[in-house]
Image (spheres, grey):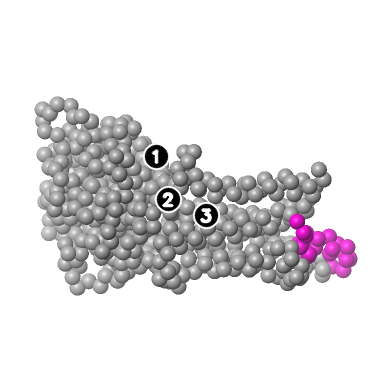
Amino acid sequence: MNITQRYRYLYKPLLFVAGVAPLAWMICGALQLFGASLGADPVKRLEHECGKTALNFLLLTLTVTPVRELGGLPQLLRLRRMLGLFAFFYAVVHFTVYLVLDLELNLRLLGADIAKRPYITIGFSALLLLLPLALTSTNGMMRRLGGRWHRLHRLIYPIAALAVWHFYWQVKRDVREPLLYVGMLALLLAYRLLRWRARGAARAVPAMGPAARLTSRSGSATAPERT
Amino acid sequence: MLTRVPRIAPSEITPPEIYFNRRTFLAGAVASAASASLPAGDAAPPSESALTYRRNPQYSVSEPPNRLEEIAGYNNFYEFGTDKESPGRYAHTLRTRPWSVTVQGEAEVRGRFNLEDLLKGQALEERIYRFRCVEAWSLVVPWVGFPLSDLLARFKPTSGAKYVEFTTLYDPAQMPGQRSRVLNWPYVEGLRIDEAMHPLALMVVGLYGRVLPNQDGAPLRLIVPWKYGFKSIKSIVQIRFSARQPDTAWNVAAPQEYGFYANVNPQVDHPRWSQASERRIGAPFLAARQPTLPFNGYAAQVASLYQGMDLRRYF
């Protein structure tokens, strides 16, 4: 198998299975299969698990660039779309569990929550912002949008910040876990900041020449690679 | 009005004997309270953890009580970790015997008392109360205990006793959650003296007719059914009568979110979430959310305690 085939027939299917696994585990818990259990409050548990899984996939999506650049694995980009779509999928399930199982479809409560509860306002905004990214994740949309695709998909940074903030804010007291997410996001964003500054410096030093500039840019995906 | 179907067939409910036998570590705890309440000369009880009590029909609710697995498997007891399941998993490290309670402050009778002595001759009753957590979930629980006023009266509080302060055990070896600083340990709660003397305020030693499981606050806890659950302090080792309002754990941790009074009030939201409704643990699918009642449904009995007070300010 060449690298393209390996990604298509091996890595991507494996990632898909890994992405579906949390959902499968939650379904087993809800149905009490294979000893899985969602505890005394299955609704809250589902809500939290889906939210955290969405957050995990969001951060994994943001980890692709540093790992492929630092680890010399440019092909890794081929997995990024699926990671991002799983983040969107779990965010939608998270919201659905909240609306249907927690609020029991009480739209008046939903309206009040979104308007009055800052952490829900924030979470809901993150979900809404993810929607255009999911809708423009197809090859066709990438082609049609061209350079604008990249500008649009930079929304991932504010989305990740909103999602982590949403997590941090809903915790009653024990913020250790949300702080871990704050730390991971800070690292991922710091990497971008440093890279952006390095690139700016490279541009400012003519001696480095256009070649250096090209190499330093190659990792930032100037054109979306088809996967 | 909401109509409720029984959420579980009686045949599906684990009999308390089986539930408690799985937790043999309770046996030690059990003997103390059981011996305190069983008539002298009684033959060995069918199970060591069984308590002698009478049902008090005056204090009951129309809703069915939660299953023991729910009440003992979904706990906020940060002394054993901040997850709801952690107390059930780790509270077996708590040694509930011997247990003593220190009484201090504005009272004629002070000192250190063995729990067994405090419980000696004390008639126990079962009361079915609603339990409303500040996190907007709720339970219905058949507690076994006795009026707090019975206990407090024995210490003869003086006229200087305006408040009562309760303290939970502090021992990180037994309560590993105390090794992390999520709250200022030990956990402290308190009531105004008139609240404490109210007949609804209950000292609890049992649940479903048996000695309290450790994760529910064994061997001695408070239940104040018209207040959010965090007021109902667990595993009490100290009672202090004082002239000034006690600094209570959650109020100190986040004063803008958790007041000293913490009366259940659907009109006053928590800064981050609504208190207008609650989800009943274990309720049928899509039928768990229900409106929260003022004073958790006990307004007729307790609202007069707060006459003339701005309940938005004193939340």
Q: Residue at x 58, y 58 (%)?
A: A89
Front residue (pair A66, B106) = A66
Please tell me whether residue A25 is drawn above or below residue B138 in the rendered image. Answer: above
Q: Residue at x 63, y 58 (%)?
A: A85
Q: Mark 1 and mark 2: span between their CA atoms?
A: 21 Å
The residue tagged with tag 3: helix, strand or loop?
helix
Q: How many marks?
A: 3
Q: Which residue is mark 3?
A: A50
Q: Amino acid at mark 2?
A: Pro
Q: Amino acid at mark 1?
A: Tyr
Mark earlier in primary sequence (2, 3): 2
B56 horizontally vs B292: left or right:
left
Please tell me whether residue A34 is drawn above or below residue B242 in the rendered image. Answer: above
Q: Which residue is mark 1?
A: B90
Please tell me whether residue A220 is drawn above or below residue B35 in the rendered image. Answer: below
Q: Mark 3 vs mark 1: tell me if same chain.
A: no
Quadrant in which residue A186 is drawn: bottom right
Image marks 3 and 1: residues in contact by CB distance under 8 Å: no
B197 horizontally vs A74: left or right:
left
Please tell me whether residue B102 is drawn above or below residue B243 in the rendered image. Answer: above
Extent of the magenta region: A205-227
The disc label shown at residue A42, or none: 2
- x and y percentages locating residue B187 in the rendered image: 33, 51
